[in-house]
Image (cartoon, grey):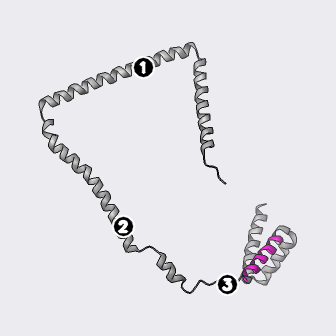
Amino acid sequence: MEQRIMEHDEIYTLMMEALDGELEESDQGQMMAHFQECSTCAREWETIQAIHQLLLQAPVLSPAADFTQRTLALLPNTRYRIYAISAIYGFLLLVGLIPLAVIIWFILQIGPAFNQPAFIRGLQQGGGQLLEVMQTVVQAGWQGLGTFGELLGQQPSILGWLLVLVGVVFLWGGVYSQLTRPQRV
């Protein structure tokens, strides 16, 4: 089979050389002998020759006399583009520097208050209270999971129903996205 594929590739190369007028007589005999054995290659050679003849008979088109000038006139002006891009980058730089300047001004105005001992104690107390609240929330979450785990141990069918419900939600989400997608014509 591989030998036959190699042979077809070689014959195809010979066909391209024949179209270019570069095929030697010995190779032409080999190509014609192959066409006697392989009707597929013979049909392909006839098709290639027909297409080649159509291309040779096609009229040569040349562009209009002022094609180059009109095309160059339609191209964007590079100097204008450089100015526009520079303006955009300058604007983005300015927009980025304004918040930075406001933050620096705010730190300079409020900075001395951060050095007051009462402020530091207040931050410590607030941070401690925040940690206590977070600890309480985490403990309640673990207790809730423990209760849910016990429930699942007693009623394992609940987990099955939850999985079915999640599957239905995803299924209908996919159906909805298919129904709301714009139709291709």
Q: Would you say residue 94 is visible in this rendering?
A: yes
Task: Pinpoint residue 151: horizontal percent, then vertical percent.
Answer: 53, 14
Instruction: Check the picture and name the quadrant holding the C terminus.
Output: bottom right
Residue linked to disc 1: 142
Q: Residue at x 51, y 80 (%)?
A: 70
Task: Pinpoint residue 107: horizontal percent, then vertical percent.
Answer: 18, 43
Crowding at dot 3, Cα within 10 Å, few <14 / some 14-19 / many 20+, comes out as few
Residue linked to disc 2: 84
Question: Which amino acid, mark 1?
Answer: Trp
**Which comes sooner in the sequence, label 3 or label 1?**
3
Name the one closer to the observer, 22 or 101: 101
Q: Residue at x 79, y 60 (%)?
A: 1
**Left or right: 113 with respect to 178?**
left
**Left or right: 162 with respect to 109?**
right
SS under mark 1:
helix
Q: Quadrant of residue 153?
A: top right
Residue linked to disc 3: 60
Task: Pinpoint residue 82: horizontal percent, then vertical percent.
Answer: 36, 70
Q: Would you say residue 38 is visible in this rendering?
A: no
Crowding at dot 1, Cα within 10 Å, few <14 / some 14-19 / many 20+, comes out as few
The CA distance from mark 3 to mark 1 is 82 Å
Q: Is residue 49 magenta?
A: yes
Question: Which amino acid, mark 3?
Answer: Val
Name the one closer to the observer, 56 or 102: 102
**Which comes sooner in the sequence, label 1 or label 2?**
2
Residue range of the region highlighted in magenta in the rendering: 43-56
Question: Which amino acid, mark 2?
Answer: Ala
